[in-house]
Image (cartoon, rainbow, N blue to C red):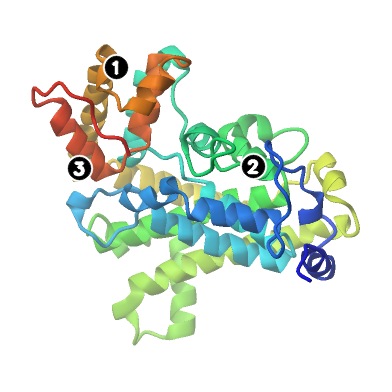
Amino acid sequence: MLDTRRYDDREHMLLASFAMRSRDTRGRRFAEPDHPYRGPFARDRDRILHSSAFRRLSGKMQVFTGEMGIYHRTRLTHTFEVASIARTISRVLRLNEDLTEALALVHDIGHPPFGHCGEDALSECMQPVGGFSHNGFALVIVEQLEQRYAKFPGLNLSLEILDGQDVRAHKAEAAVGRSPLLEVQLVDAADSMAYDAHDVDDALQMGLLSMNELMELSIVRRAMELVREKQGTDRLREERQLLVHELIDLQVTDFLSEATERVVEFQGQSVSEVRDAGLRLGHSDPLARERAELESFLFEAVYRHPRLIPVRRAAYHRVQDMFEVLRHDPSRLPLRFRRRCESHPIETVVGEYLAGMTDSFCNAQYKYATDGSTGPLADW
């Protein structure tokens, strides 16, 4: 007979003592019977994967919009890269891979259209209700806005998933005192490793950066030395792809080396004991400094690149203009959002509606909202 004992047996054999076990989950807000052959975090992963909000990530920019080509990453491809890195780390450290993957898949689900410029626009517009956080909005999506079940709102994810996403929404508070689950910590680390590497890749491919400029950075020089040691000099036509691979490998290897050393003294201890001790995973000090140098460079050289600024500025103003149209005339909101206005401030509801859009959907609704029409906009 199929039952969850198979999951318990597998985790007992494979996981470290400080890994989060499926049998120890605190459950869901709305109680549900166990699934016969999937653990709770595997069910969470599948619910996230099949949600409409997750699919919409394919139409949301990471850094570069569709106007700048089709090669570069979207929020969806970024999410899969994060999940891949996070699962690798989780497996080596003998942590819970299902929990890790679910956390990775949900981590960016609350991003608005047009990347960080969209978030900046919403944050300014929503100041009367405390601003906007894509990490916080992810919780609104999975707890309220997704409508897939008759018995409860949202996806009814395990409390460990919700708590992990809440850590992302309150990083300053989570950085002190009792530490988050190790699975939560490594997903956050995998996120930054992925975007450091793929922003380099996208910027090089689009001609926003040259290899000579990047070679001024310590971590890039080190990665290129490893590329040449492994590949020789006859593969330099593919040096961009090889560099990106090495940047990821360099960061993951360093993280695992540090993590392995830090968890040694906690062998045999429980999840609760490790969290009470405040164990936090991270890179070595030398690599952390090199990554900080890279991220500072990318901020100035890529995110503020002259080719990117006008595109970001235009997107910023589209979001702001739409917000003002809807704030002053809530009747133009789709029906379910008009209903939310009965229990939520108008600024919150308009922000939620805009934040759920893809880039292209936002552009289409912007045209409709500003062309003299008076009817409700489309729901996503």
* Mark drawn on residue 330: 1
Query: Residue 217 location in percent, x, y?
Result: 42, 57
Q: Callout 3, which amino acid?
A: Pro
Check contact, mark 2 vs mark 3: CB within 8 A.
no
Q: Amino acid at mark 2?
A: Gly
Is 298 on the left or on the right of 99, as rendered? left
Q: Is residue 297 left or right of residue 98?
A: left
Quadrant position of the N terminus in the picture: bottom right
Q: Is residue 69 left or right of residue 273?
A: left
Residue 112 location (% of width, % of height)? 37, 37
| Residue neighbourhood size for the residue with mark 2, other residues' Cα within 10 Å, grouped as few (<14), some (14–19), many (≥20) | many
* Residue at image point 59% right, 63% down: 252
What mark, if any, has residue 304 been given in the picture? none
For label 3, the SS is loop
Q: CA distance from mark 2 to mark 1?
A: 34 Å
Under mark 1, the amino acid is Pro
Counting residues from the start of the chain, the first of labels 3 and 1 encountered is 3
Crowd band around label 1 with a 10 angstrom C-alpha radius: few (<14), some (14–19), many (20+): some
> In this figure, which residue is indicated by the disc labeled 3?
306
Q: Nearer the viewer, residue 377 or 217?
A: 377
Q: Which mark is residue 164?
A: 2
Q: Earlier in the sequence, mark 2 or mark 3?
A: 2
- Mark 2, mark 3: which one is toward the viewer? 2
- Looking at the image, do the residues carrying marks 3 and 1 touch, with CB atoms under 8 Å apart? no
Relative height, residue 318 to residue 35 (above, below): above
Q: Residue at x 50, y 47 (%)?
A: 292
Query: Given contact means CB atoms under 8 Å apart, are the residues at marks 2 and 1 in contact?
Result: no
The quadrant the C terminus occupies is top left
Q: Residue at x 35, y 53 (%)?
A: 58
- Of residues 181 and 332, the one nearer the viewer is 332
